[in-house]
Every structure is written in structure tokens, then in C-alpha cells.
């Protein structure tokens, strides 16, 4: 086992222990988290509230991430967001609808909506067809999701997951049909497309803060603290590397 | 039952992760089997999701008075045709490949062309949509980097000061992208660990 492997394992263990530690009741009580304001997420909360009141539907798009690929954490965040949106909109007439571009994520989103229906005693309004695959290639996925966005009853859209340049179609559809759209992706291309299209866009790691800001679970706020610690470590490492490089050591 | 699901998921995740770091033959063989199983499960999930799309969503639309009824019928017919020809000819058959690619490639190419117009239109409307300092900087960046990458400033390569300045400007977006990617990498790591230790469970039904 080489140094890189040890270091990798150490980072994973450190992250797991950090999440466990900061999730603890004692630490949360003695050192409450202070979150900076992200206005876009406040607007999303308000939009979910409005959709509950006016009986419209929230659409969550998970993008084209592949469940069997290492680039899927953005869609996993999307599933957490779907769970929370399901909880927040459970008092409304219309449960959320979820679309995805991968079979695995389509089944997982069905499972999430089923779990929400059980938790909130709204089994009677649960329809397994509220979460579905709209296409297996990025373009076919986008076109299928556009169809859902254009449907009457969907006024709020949350696009959280992996998207490419083709997300320009989704952005155009939401501009035309939706009252509010929040977009977040791990792809820099998609972030710039969403920003240019005028959607509320989360940049960079703000995507991973979404469940914590929606008040999902203590572990999500703990994750943000661990992320901050890791960022400090990486920053320190970069500065140290630059100094060593300039001074000619190593 | 829920508890057993969670234990199986966490154990599988830990073994696959350990196999990534520890190159021990025992762990490697279990890791390979688990990953192969995962790939098969993803394939089956894909099939189930496609069948659900065709018969759960579009079949229902085709039977109801839905505005997109005709498209749903077209999708079902195209799906059945592809499925039947795929089963009889085989997915690697050149005729079948030609049939699929001769439909899919032109459609996606024309969509790509359409996308170019959509994106240019979005870029033109940036200032109209973002009437704040962020929008101004974003718009200014678009103009500056369009000019820089267009090649109209190629003559400056003979002037050392301008060459250095342009090289600096070419590095700016790379530095910004690296900063964003670093944040995304850390977020991905923490999200993955959360699923691994079972605090996030998108599989509990």
C-alpha cells in the first residue's frame, strides 16, 4: 500500500469521523452551525410554500448522471433534495414529480417518493409514475423533461444533478413555463448555461449545501463543517506546495 | 428488513472502497464480484425504467385524452419496432446498427445545431436577465474571452508585454474553474461518505 492510498483512506476516515462528531447532539448544542445566506435557496423555500398553497406541482430533475459512475454525487444530493421537497410539500394537493436520465436513479427516486408517502401518511396520493426515466441519452432526457416542465400544474422546477451544454433546452423551457427555477450542477458548462439563461443558479459546492439549507438532517450541516475543514487543509497544502516550489525544496 | 438492507449496503460500500485502497487478493475478488453485480443491477434497473416509461407513462397517456397523445403512440411504436428488430437481428447486427444510428444521429445533430442558437440567444439576454454587478461582470467576461479566443489579437504575440498579459488572461478562467472543481470534489467526497456510512439512504423505501 503506497502513500497515496494511505492518504486517501485517511481522508475518508477523517470525513466519516467528522460527520459523526459534528452530527452529535452535544457538539450541535455547544457549537451551533452558522450558515451564510444563500438567497436562491430562500427563494426556493418560498416557491415550495407557494406551490403548496396554490396546488401546483414541484418538478425535480436529476439530470443524466449514471448510478454506476463516480460522477453521480450531484444526483445523490438531488435525491436528498427530492426527499426534503416531498416532506415540505406533503400538505399540498400535488406531490412532487421527479425525472432522471438513468434507470437506477429513476428507481431510486420512486423509492424516495414512496418513503416520503409513508413518512407523511400520504400513501393515498402516491403514484409510482411520478418518478420516471425520460430518456437514456442526454438529449432524449432533456426533451422528455421539457415535456414535464411544459405540463400544466408544474410551476416550480429544481434542477439538481449532472447536466451538459444541452441543459440550454431545459433552461429555455423553464424560462417559458415556470414561475421559479433553481438550477445546480457539478458541471461547469451547465452552471454557466443556467446562469446565462437567468435561472437562480448555485455555483460550485453550493450544490452540496442544498439539503443542509433545506433543513434535512443534522448530518448535512455536519458535512458542511467537514467540507470547510477539508477546504482549509487543501488550501494549506496548496500554499505549502507553492512555497516549497518557489524555494526550490522538493 | 430495513436494517438488513442498510447493513448490506454499508458493508458492500466499505468492501468496494477498501478494495480501491488495499490491493489484497481476497478483498479484490470480493470487490470485483460486487462491482459486476452492481453493473448487472444497473442494467436491469435501466430496463425496468424504460418499460415503466413506455407502459407506465406513455401507454397511460396514449389511452387518455392527453395533448401529447400522438407523440406517446409514436414512442411506443418506435420502441416496439426497435425492440423486435433488436431481438431478431441482434444488437451488433450491421443492419440494426444502421437503422438505429440513421435515426438517432441526424436527430441529435439537428438538436445540437438548435442548441447553438438557444445558447447564443441566452448569452445575448444575459444583461437583460441579470441587472446587477454579477450580471455585468459575467457579460463583460463573455465579451473579453470571446475576443481573446477569436484570434484577432494574434498580432500581439510579437510584443512581449502584451503576450504576457494575454497569457495571464488565458490563465484566469482555468484558475476559476479549478477553484470550483475543488469545491465540487470536496462536496462529492463528503456526499459519498454520507451514503457510505448510512446517514443518507436513498434506498430505504
Image (cartoon, rainbow, N blue to C red):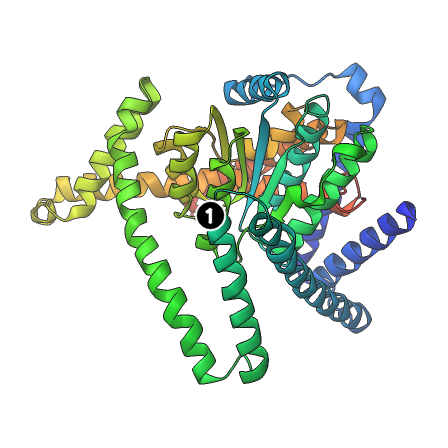
Q: Chain of mark 1?
A: A
| In the image: residue B204, left or right of residue A48 | right
Point 26% across, 33% down: residue: B141
In the image, is residue A151 above or below residue B129?
below
Residue A3 in percent (x, y) is at: 66, 57
Image quadrant holding the C terminus of chain B, namely top right
Residue B104 in percent (x, y) is at: 40, 65
Residue A232 in percent (x, y) is at: 58, 32
| In the image: residue B10, left or right of residue B116 | right
In the image, is residue A102 above or below residue B31?
above
Q: Which residue is mark 1?
A: A142
Point 79% across, 59% down: residue: B15
- The front one of A244 and A6 is A6
Q: Secondary structure at mark 1?
A: helix
Question: How would you rate the neighbour count of disc 1 (Cα within 10 Å): few for under 14, some for 14-19, many for 20 or more?
Answer: many
- The front one of B136 and A115 is A115
Displayed quadrant of residue A29: top right
Residue B193 in percent (x, y) is at: 71, 44
Displayed quadrant of residue B44: bottom right
* Residue B70 in sight here: yes
Point 31% across, 29% down: residue: B138
Displayed quadrant of residue B26: bottom right
* Residue A72 in sight here: no
In the image, is residue A219 above or below residue A62?
above
Amino acid at each position: 500500500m503506497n502513500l497515496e492510498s494511505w492518504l486517501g483512506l485517511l481522508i475518508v476516515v477523517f470525513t466519516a469521523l467528522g460527520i459523526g462528531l459534528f452530527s452529535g447532539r452535544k457538539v450541535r448544542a455547544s457549537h451551533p452551525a452558522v450558515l451564510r445566506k444563500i438567497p436562491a435557496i430562500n427563494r426556493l423555500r418560498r416557491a415550495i410554500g407557494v406551490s403548496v398553497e396554490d396546488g401546483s406541482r414541484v418538478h425535480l430533475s436529476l439530470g443524466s448522471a449514471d448510478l454506476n459512475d463516480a460522477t453521480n454525487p450531484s444526483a445523490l444530493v438531488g435525491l436528498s433534495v427530492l426527499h426534503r421537497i416531498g416532506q415540505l410539500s406533503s400538505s399540498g394537493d400535488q406531490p412532487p414529480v421527479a425525472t432522471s436520465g438513468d434507470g437506477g436513479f429513476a428507481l431510486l427516486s420512486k423509492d424516495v417518493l414512496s418513503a416520503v408517502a409513508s413518512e407523511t401518511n400520504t400513501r393515498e396520493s402516491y403514484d409510482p409514475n411520478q418518478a420516471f426515466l425520460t430518456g437514456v441519452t442526454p438529449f432524449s432526457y432533456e426533451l422528455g423533461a421539457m415535456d414535464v416542465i411544459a405540463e400544466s400544474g408544474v410551476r416550480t422546477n429544481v434542477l439538481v444533478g449532472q447536466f451538459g451544454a444541452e441543459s440550454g433546452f431545459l433552461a429555455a423551457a423553464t424560462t417559458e413555463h415556470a414561475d421559479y427555477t433553481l438550477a445546480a450542477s457539478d458541471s461547469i458548462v451547465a452552471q454557466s448555461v443556467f446562469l446565462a439563461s437567468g435561472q437562480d443558479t448555485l455555483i460550485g459546492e453550493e450544490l452540496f449545501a442544498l439539503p443542509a439549507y433545506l433543513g434535512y438532517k443534522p448530518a448535512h450541516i455536519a458535512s458542511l463543517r467537514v467540507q470547510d475543514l477539508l477546504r482549509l487543509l487543501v488550501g494549506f497544502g496548496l500554499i505549502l506546495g507553492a512555497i516549497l516550489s518557489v524555494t526550490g525544496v522538493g | 428488513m430495513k436494517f438488513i438492507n442498510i447493513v448490506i449496503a454499508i458493508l458492500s460500500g466499505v468492501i468496494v472502497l477498501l478494495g480501491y485502497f488495499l490491493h489484497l487478493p481476497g478483498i479484490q475478488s470480493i470487490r470485483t464480484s460486487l462491482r459486476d453485480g452492481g453493473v448487472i443491477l444497473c442494467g436491469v434497473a435501466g430496463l425496468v425504467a424504460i418499460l415503466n416509461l413506455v407502459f407506465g407513462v406513455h401507454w397511460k397517456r396514449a389511452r387518455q385524452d392527453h395533448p401529447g397523445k400522438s407523440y406517446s403512440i409514436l414512442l411506443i411504436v418506435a420502441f416496439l419496432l426497435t425492440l423486435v428488430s433488436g431481438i431478431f437481428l441482434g444488437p451488433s447486427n450491421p443492419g440494426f446498427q444502421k437503422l438505429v444510428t440513421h435515426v438517432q444521429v441526424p436527430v441529435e445533430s439537428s438538436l445540437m445545431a438548435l442548441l447553438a442558437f438557444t445558447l447564443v440567444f441566452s448569452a445575448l439576454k444575459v444583461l437583460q436577465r441579470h441587472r446587477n454587478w454579477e450580471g455585468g461582470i459575467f457579460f463583460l467576461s463573455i465579451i473579453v474571452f470571446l475576443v481573446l479566443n477569436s484570434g484577432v489579437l494574434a498580432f500581439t504575440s510579437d510584443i512581449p508585454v502584451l503576450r504576457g498579459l494575454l497569457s495571464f488572461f488565458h490563465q484566469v478562467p482555468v484558475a476559476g474553474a479549478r477553484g470550483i472543481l475543488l469545491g465540487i470534489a470536496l462536496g462529492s467526497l463528503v456526499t459519498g461518505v454520507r451514503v457510505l456510512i448510512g446517514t443518507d439512504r436513498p434506498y430505504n423505501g
